[in-house]
Amino acid sequence: MSASAAIEVRDVSKRFRIWREKPTSLKQRLLAGRSRAEDFWALRDVTFDVPSGSSFGLIGHNGSGKTTLLKVIAGILRPTTGSVRQRGRLAALLELGAGFHPELTGRENVYLNASFLGMSRRETDRVYDDIVGFAELEGFMETAVKFYSSGMLVRLGFAVAVHVDPDVLLVDEVLAVGDEAFQARCIERVQRFQREGRTIVLVTHALDQVRQLCDLAVMLDHGRVRAAGAPDDVVRDMRMAILRQDLAFAHEEGSKEVEIDSAALLVGDDPLGGPLAPGDVLTIQVDLRANEPVDDPVVSFALHDAANRFVVGGDTASSGVPLGRLEGKRRVRFHVGPLPFVAGRYWVTIGVHSRDNRHAYHVQDQRYAFSVESAEGGREQVFVPVRAEVSDP
Ligand SMILES: Nc1ncnc2c1ncn2[C@@H]1O[C@H](COP(=O)(O)OP(=O)(O)O)[C@@H](O)[C@H]1O
Ligand SMILES: [Mg+2]
């Protein structure tokens, strides 16, 4: 293994076997015969190095294989083919509560976890108070973690991971959980690790975080490396890919478990009266109605110009505003701009789909339109900042 690499991933593929057991009634089951196994490749020929001391961002759509890859690096999953080599003590913060035993107390879990990571009891004694303090769980350490909220679990997991003196830290999407103060402390800790020359692999939906924190990035797309290199470039490719996915389902009608009740284009809080001027912020307001409870739907939008060229898009998941379990009504607003668009007419596509983007609940393809009056500098394609918010209508 090369001296400069903390992690070497070589031609890694990972196959899952999925058992199809759809038929429910006895008759169906008899007709269907034995349940079938299907192969699914969550990772395909993945190769890259994580240089020692670097901060490495791993991005990609939901289901692209990020968590699977982290588990392979952490040695929790064995690759079907290929190999991973890694040097130094590795601490991984993978998913909510992973590595915690629900029946054990917070204190017992800290000692258990630390021992898995190669810490002796005495070493753990020394950092125990810091762990509790960082997690802000004073008063809860004698409680079984099954009574913890998700925020408490994340805080404890992160606190343990950063206090076991790891050479390599893997972090899967947890920086998006917890309150802002805790997130800020996590980021501060990641930055301290960077200064100390430790290696960090960060999976996140917050693309700007990747640009700010990472030296290198890789984008996975359906289990394959789609882009690798400087974070700015990889993030740009990711944003392009998000847009293309929007287009991929643009012609579907959707199954309507969640419907777009209504949508409106606003400036500030006012309906759009006339053309927009360059520099305006366009608000796309989407009122949703769930006809049945749906977990984690994602709302996305795309703007196309009059020549049907994609201009900008975004979605609630990549904007970091998950909808959670949707029951009844919900309002989503995308604030798009300031708009550096060229003058002309633009079309808005709005969609609601499943988190993995495979299932469209409702898509309104280029149903809404607006105009821009005039603009300086007619750039061909621009990226516009997008902020999303969710509230009751
Ligand atoms: N244990 C498993 N068995 C079958 N399929 C799995 C398993 N774990 C993950 N997958 C599938 O592999 C794909 C990649 O999943 P994952 O690595 O969790 O993606 P990401 O973290 O990028 O969202 C998904 O389609 C997921 O459904
Ligand atoms: Mg994941």
Image: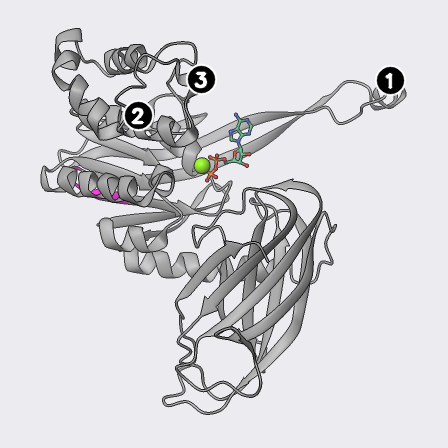
Label 2 sits on a secondary structure element that is helix
Kindly tell me whether residue 88 is visible in this rendering.
no
Name which residue type carries label 2.
Answer: Leu
In the figure, is residue 235 to the left or right of 358?
Answer: left
Near mark 1 (Cα within 10 A), the count class, few <14, some 14-19 or many ≥20, is few
Q: Is residue 76 visible?
A: yes
Q: Main secondary structure of the magenta part?
A: loop
Question: Quarter holding the C terminus?
Answer: bottom right
Q: Is residue 259 left or right of residue 29?
A: left
| Up/down of 204 relative to 105, above or below | below
Residue annotated with mark 1: 26
* Mark-to-mark CA distance, 1 and 2: 46 Å
Determine the residue located farthest toward the right in the rendered image. 27
What residue is shown at x 32% (from left), y 56% (from top)? Answer: 208
Comes first in the chain, label 1 or label 3: 1
Between label 1 and label 3, give the one nearer the viewer: 3
Q: Which residues are magenta?
A: 52-56
| Residue 156 numbered mark, or none | 2
x and y, in percent, of residue 171 in the image: 31, 35
Q: Amino acid at mark 1?
A: Leu
Query: Which residue occupies the foreground of this view, 354 or 86?
Result: 354
Find residue 146 and name its label: 3
Q: Which residue sits furthest top? A: 121
Q: Name the N-terminal-most of marks 1 and 2.
A: 1
Q: What quarter of the picture does the N terminus occupy?
A: top left
